Image: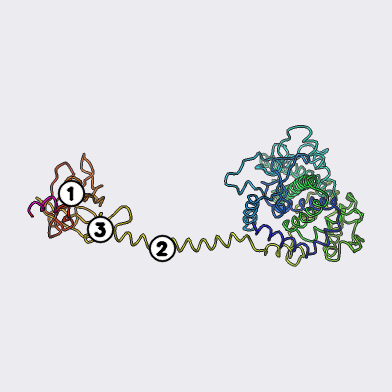
């Protein structure tokens, strides 16, 4: 339990001592909420999985602060969250943090409970891949159906239960799509659909030409049409689809972030809201794997004083951020904001905006003339793919320090327990070896008094008729032709017991060679008291069932004395 508080203190101290404090503290609560939403959007584009639709960095940040959200609710007004303060929940939080620091990605308390409750998954999880014909208004408006859709046209969110839920979802998505970060992405989706349809038309047209030329080859001296290489266009189509999926996943992460933060803000007083939002914004950013280049974009969207407009130049396809280049600072809370480190990263965004206008442009003429591109550069139509922060980036370095926070001490205890368990296992192995030497702890392999210890692994032979009979203690029993080394198996060692009526020791061998039209051979040896260890006789009273008599000192016990010698005394 102490670990949860200790870790939270270390996390808080790390964030307060970092550059993030100067970035986040000047923001209002509304701006912090938008900051988290946009961080989720970039993070969603980084994810390479299509199985999760919730904002993972935000949920993982919540775990660090003892906050979890209900998994099944979608509507902002219905979404609930829980602050875990009791001892039982804090133990589960410790387990969650331990698993996450060990490489897993868990955010639900149920996932570490002994008997987790199965909930209906909605916004947070999905087993369906992202559909390529999602109902993005900018994407499909006026362009008909996406001919490359592999899905059924349904939204990747769980199906709404009523019109109110659909309306609420649409309103949140529209807000997300309208930000300056989303504008070039939505334009890219529209352009991507146009290009993919044109590529489809081109491929179908050339296929038809090839088929017609093949059918008429050699007639009227017509020349065969040159072979058409479709590979570059297939590659462009694949790259377009990959970027579409990335953009859509980012939008969904942003919607998720919007809903989760709204729920949080409705459940606490103003002071609690402020403290939670500051910590969540910082931790979400740290867990997002983003870089300062993204922070500059987020800040310029979240703070209206920078004068960023949510529009894209239709002639140059320049990013909306081109309007705030070169990066500038404003006076916020008596200090220059956002500071030189963030603006230095922003300068790279401005360089990209200039390059986009010069190199890529809108490509209107090429598209109109059916001169389709055969290579899809990053920054095409103003959309740059999201990449994680790199070493040397201030945010990357902060994430590294965060990951160096010691994991839960339970791991150290588990390691110590593992060492002790190995020592215990070694002692048990030694004990088992000693027990085997004396016949075992329960099975009494060497007999109730250990009498077989002196006979173990010895073999004894007797001749009866035309056969030699050999029995080996703890080994095999055989019937051999006279003078032969090997023979017919009468079975392997089975058991050793004392007959209650006669008091004789009885040794059995079973599972021998099967008789023709009969059972498997077996042998039973009855031991009586004698000075030597030797077989006295062998017989076959029933088909393939052999009885042998043996004398040995092991039969000379007090019971034998009472039965046979006490009267003589």
The residue that appears at 85% across and 46% down in the rendered structure is 178
Which residue occupies the foreground of this view, 381 or 372?
381
Mark 3 surroundings within 10 Å by alpha-carbon count, few (fewer than 14), some (14 through 19), many (20 or more):
some
Q: CA distance from mark 2 to mark 1?
A: 38 Å
Question: Which residue is disc 2 drawn over?
Answer: 427
Q: Is residue 449 above or below residue 166?
A: below
- Pointer 3 with pointer 2, Cβ within 8 A: no
Q: Is residue 474 visible?
A: no
- Lower sequence index among marks 2 and 1: 2
Q: Which residues are magenta?
A: 561-568
Give the number of the disc on residue 450: 3
Q: Is residue 565 magenta?
A: yes
**Location of the C terminus (image quadrant):** bottom left
Mark 2 surroundings within 10 Å by alpha-carbon count, few (fewer than 14), some (14 through 19), many (20 or more):
few
Disc 3 secondary structure class: loop
Q: Is residue 465 magenta?
A: no
Question: Which residue is disc 1 drawn over?
Answer: 503
Q: Which callout, 2 or 1, points to the residue nearer the camera?
A: 1
């Amino acid at each position: 339990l102490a670990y949860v508080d200790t870790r939270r203190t270390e996390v808080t101290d790390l964030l307060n001592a970092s550059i993030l404090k100067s970035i986040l503290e000047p923001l209002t609560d509304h701006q912090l909420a938008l900051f988290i939403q946009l961080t989720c959007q970039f993070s969603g584009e980084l994810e390479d999985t299509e199985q999760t639709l919730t904002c993972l960095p935000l949920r993982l940040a919540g775990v660090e602060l003892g906050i979890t959200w209900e998994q099944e609710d979608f509507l902002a007004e219905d979404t609930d969250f829980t602050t875990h303060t009791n001892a039982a929940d804090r133990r589960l939080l410790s387990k969650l943090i331990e698993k996450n620091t060990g490489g897993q990605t868990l955010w639900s308390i149920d996932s570490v409970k002994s008997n987790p409750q199965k909930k209906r998954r909605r916004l947070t999880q999905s087993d369906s891949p992202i559909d390529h014909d999602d109902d993005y208004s900018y994407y499909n408006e006026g362009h008909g159906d996406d001919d490359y859709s592999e899905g059924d046209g349904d939204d990747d969110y769980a199906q709404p239960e009523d019109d109110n839920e659909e309306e609420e979802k649409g309103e949140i998505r529209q807000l997300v799509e309208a930000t300056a970060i989303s504008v070039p992405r939505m334009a890219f989706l529209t352009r991507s659909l146009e290009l993919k349809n044109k590529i489809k038309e081109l491929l179908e047209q050339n296929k038809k030409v090839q088929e017609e030329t093949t059918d008429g080859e050699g007639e009227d001296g017509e020349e065969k049409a040159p072979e058409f290489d479709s590979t570059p266009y297939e590659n462009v189509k694949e790259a377009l689809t990959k970027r579409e999926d990335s953009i859509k996943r980012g939008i969904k992460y942003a919607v998720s972030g919007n809903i989760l933060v709204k729920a949080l803000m409705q459940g606490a007083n103003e002071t609690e809201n402020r403290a939670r939002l500051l910590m969540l914004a910082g931790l979400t950013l740290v867990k997002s794997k983003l870089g300062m280049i993204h922070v500059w974009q987020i800040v310029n969207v979240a703070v209206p004083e920078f004068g960023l407009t949510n529009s894209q130049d239709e002639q140059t396809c320049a990013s909306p951020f081109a309007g705030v280049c070169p990066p500038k600072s404003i006076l916020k809370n008596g200090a220059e904001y956002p500071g030189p480190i963030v603006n230095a990263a922003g300068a790279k965004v401005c360089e990209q905006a200039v390059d986009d206008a010069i190199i890529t442009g809108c490509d209107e003429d090429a598209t109109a003339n059916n001169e389709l591109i055969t290579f899809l550069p990053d920054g095409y139509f103003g959309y740059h793919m999201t990449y994680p922060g790199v070493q040397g980036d201030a945010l990357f370095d902060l994430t590294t320090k965060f990951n160096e926070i010691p994991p839960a001490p339970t791991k150290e205890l588990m390691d110590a327990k593992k060492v002790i368990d190995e020592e215990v296992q070694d002692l048990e192995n030694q004990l088992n070896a000693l027990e085997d030497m004396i016949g075992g702890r329960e099975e009494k392999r060497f007999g109730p008094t250990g009498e077989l210890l002196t006979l173990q692994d010895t073999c004894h032979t007797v001749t009866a008729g035309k056969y030699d009979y050999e029995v080996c203690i703890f080994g095999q029993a055989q019937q051999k032709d006279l003078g032969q080394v090997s023979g017919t198996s009468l079975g392997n060692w089975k058991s050793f017991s004392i007959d209650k009526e006669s008091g004789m020791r009885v040794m059995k061998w079973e599972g021998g060679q099967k008789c023709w039209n009969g059972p498997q051979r077996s042998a039973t040896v009855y031991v009586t008291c004698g000075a030597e260890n030797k077989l006295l006789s062998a017989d076959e009273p029933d088909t393939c069932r052999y009885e042998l008599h043996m004398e040995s000192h092991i039969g000379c016990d007090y019971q034998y004395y009472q039965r046979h010698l006490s009267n003589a005394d």
